[in-house]
Image: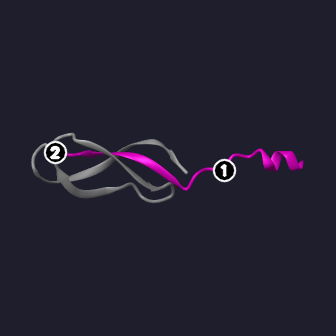
Amino acid sequence: MFLTNILLKRVKSKLIMVEMESLVSGHKFNQVRERLGEKLEMIKFDPFIQKDSVYREKRKVKSVK
């Protein structure tokens, strides 16, 4: 293998930005997580209903360096 092939390979970032969505109201925000980590699920304050709500990871937005 030539040295140029090794130098031109692109390194994947360790972090990705994902979109989190409320299961109750549909409110969305972005969160950063590790690429190899499990999908996120958290309880956070939802401003639409003024109460705590469960948020689940909806989709990947972009890679973060």
- Residue 58 located within the stretch drawn in magenta: no
x 30%, y 45%: residue: 29
Q: Earlier in the sequence, mark 2 or mark 1?
A: 1
* Along the line of sight, the residue nearer the viewer: 37 or 8: 8
Disc 2 residue type? Val
Measure the alpha-carbon separation of dots 2 and 1.
38 Å
Q: Position of residue 48 (x, y in %)?
A: 13, 43
Locate residue 47 relative to residue 39 in the image: left or right.
Answer: left
x 42%, y 58%: residue: 38
x 85%, y 45%: residue: 4
Q: Is residue 1 visible?
A: no
Q: Position of residue 64 (x, y in %)?
A: 51, 49
Q: Which residue is mark 1?
A: 11
Disc 1 residue type? Val
Instruction: Decide: few, some or many residues near mark 2? Use Cα within 10 Å; few <14, some 14-19, many ≥20.
Output: few
Region of the chain picked out in magenta, as a range: 1-24
Q: Position of residue 51 (x, y in %)?
A: 11, 53
**Please, which residue is most extreme toward the right here?**
2
